[in-house]
Amino acid sequence: MSSAAALLPPPARPPHDPLAMRLGGDGGWPAALMGSDADSDGCALMLPAAPGAARTLLESSGSLGGLVPPRNVAIDDEGAVWLLGSMSGKLKRFDLCTCAFVTVPCTAGIGTGPRALAASGGIAIDGATLFLCDAGAPGRLLLFDRRSFALRAEWRPPAGATVNPWQPVAVAVGRDVVYVADPANGCIHRFHRWGGWRGAIEGLGAVTAIVLDCHGRLFVVVPGQPAITIVTGTGASAGRAALPREVADDFPPAPFPVAPDGTIDLSGICAAAGSYDGEGDSALWPAPPSPAFATAAVWTSPALDSRIARCTWHRLMPDAMIGLHQRAMFSTYTAEAAVPDDVIALLPDSAWTAVPWSGDGGDALILSPPGRYLWLRATLGSDGSGTPRLCGTVIEYPRISLRRYLPAAFGSDPVSADFTDRLLAIFDRGFRDIEARIDNGAAMFDPASAPAGKANDVLGWIGSWIGLSVERGWPEARRRAIVKAAGKLFACRGTVRGLRNMLLLWLGWDDLKLMPQRPVCGPRCRPAAAPPVPPTLVLEHWKLRRWLWLGKGRLGSDAVLWGESILGRSRLDDTAQTGATRLDTTRNPLLDPFNVAANRASVFLPARTISDGRKLGMVRRLIQDLTPADALVAIIPVHARMRIGVQASIGFDSVIGCWPAGVTLDGSALGRATILTGAVPGGPEAARIGRSARLLPPPQPSRGS
């Protein structure tokens, strides 16, 4: 046992404390028995959707039941929403100033011409490239520049690659491959990133939408099928699915709500926005079908084993959300030996013992007779307009009653003992809650386990012990790391080292994992690069002094002479100038050169981390808390650019990248990030001093000459 674990109280268990078993929550609900018809979204138990009301992955909009945007909507790297009109073919962009979709200038809709679409299809965005599907005849995949809207290229499969005319209706951009759905030929075409055709995944049917998940798998939507098909990037089968909850973990959180008909709700992006249809026009959010849920459902747990013979199960503590015209009831069944599932499913209602739970929170005693195994049954009901949600429940066992401190006469017979136990349970609950808080008190003082919710933020309280201000606007994981490391950094507080280390923690760069590392794949591959060194972030201005040293310096831009202008002080009738010099009552010519920028510094941070006033304010307060009162610190945003002579300080606002690797056939696209390596085949290698050139002695004359 570690020294830290030895200081914690022992875990609660008999004979003084009961055990606990949790169902639901992050651990999910165990597989129900036969005959159970309640539904679960992984964490909460609820009523199943009514027939025709449940969302499926086969929706015509291609949103996979709301997991992703519709096929005619895409989001770029900057978070902007783009929409390709489903009927007009006009390209639109959501304007955050007007909170409405604005037609992109210099782009055509349905019509004729190289930039017009014969029929609107899907859209995708990859970096600075817009992919638009022209599903008309002849089919085309148009590539536009996202900033200038210049038409870069038109992609088509080669002649003879398709039986019927090509019909691109949806596009998905992978890491190295661009996938295009072609329902006319029942396949998905694969293109290189530079436009070359790589083949097709055939035998899929009339594909109307394709989506890439986080693992690089393709979700293929074909109308009329009971489930969607999941394939790998090369076409190998990876399974089938029908409901969104089955594959929800394979996709990032949806950026905005999507209705079954493709209507999107952008009110979370812009306060004055609302719902928009497939053309980008304002629309009403479609009303759900009535009824939306079944009116009743039953869930039955499998056998819950206490591993205690003749166990008296104590109480049930449900965590449920029950609205108007909704209900949730519980009942239990116990047995000393395991009972087959089919027997439990056929038990009459009279065999189950109701749990007297009021439905407004709190707990309820389990009144079933003693038994090693327990089965829990939850009955949910509503009027069909909504559903109760059972988020979880805790079952305590065995019953350890306060009756053990009373005379034996209070439990001389089973009826008296049961009444006494139920009466004392009212007081026992309060005692247990106080004891639990005491037992778990040690977790309140550890940054890794302290609560960090909005209603009960203990991290800020712990940080205040050492004078650290922890704002609730920081991400929870970052706040925990800062509070945990604050004690070690306290010794260097107020120094450049302390400020830099705290900023690295605030940025999440303390683990040195700034970029993914490629694994070593073989003896001829380059070894994995060492982790990059975190940037300096803090630049003290005294390091920028360009003094002229006797015997070492030269007059010019790299050196300056000491003089009166070093601090820009004002002298009447000589150097006084409004806006250029300053009034100062103290004079110390000997220390003036050293005082220049002695208390000034600049902090270089990525521009995205201080992109708005709230983030910038948090950084300023953090810096003020970690620097002396007379320090003047300027925050410099670092953008993705490098301008020689203007903004190019290596280690602060500019980074020199690694030399790129060579081009791999069928795996690289020629561009600014690729280089050609190796000698040109078929020709002799040019002589290079120090490598391939050799000096030979002059030839000797022959005897006959």
Image (cartoon, grey):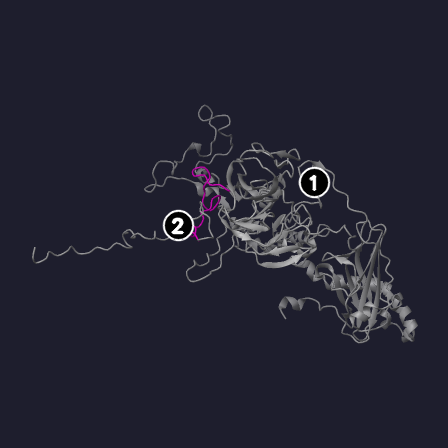
Q: Is residue 156 above or below residue 701?
A: above
Q: Quadrant of residue 250?
A: bottom right
Res 630 seen here: no
In the rendered image, residue 192, in percent from the top left (x then y), is placed at 50, 49
- Determine the residue positioned at 78% across, 52% down: 51
The secondary element bearing badge 2 is classed as loop
Crowd around label 1: few <14 · some 14–19 · many ≥20 (10 Å): some
Say whether disc 2 or disc 1 marks the residue closer to the N-terminus: 1
- Quadrant holding the C terminus: bottom left
What secondary structure characterizes most of the magenta part? loop
The tally of labels here is 2
> What residue did someone put label 2 on?
676
Amino acid carrying mark 1 in the image: Ser
Frontmost residue, 424 versus 179: 179
Crowd around label 2: few <14 · some 14–19 · many ≥20 (10 Å): few
In the rendered image, residue 425, in percent from the top left (x then y), is placed at 86, 65
> What residue did someone put label 1 on?
267
From the viewer's perspective, is 576 left or right of 440? left
- Quadrant holding the N terminus: bottom right
Amino acid carrying mark 2 in the image: Leu
Is 507 colored magenta in this rendering? no
Is 663 colored magenta in this rendering? yes
In the rendered image, residue 45, in percent from the top left (x then y), is placed at 77, 58
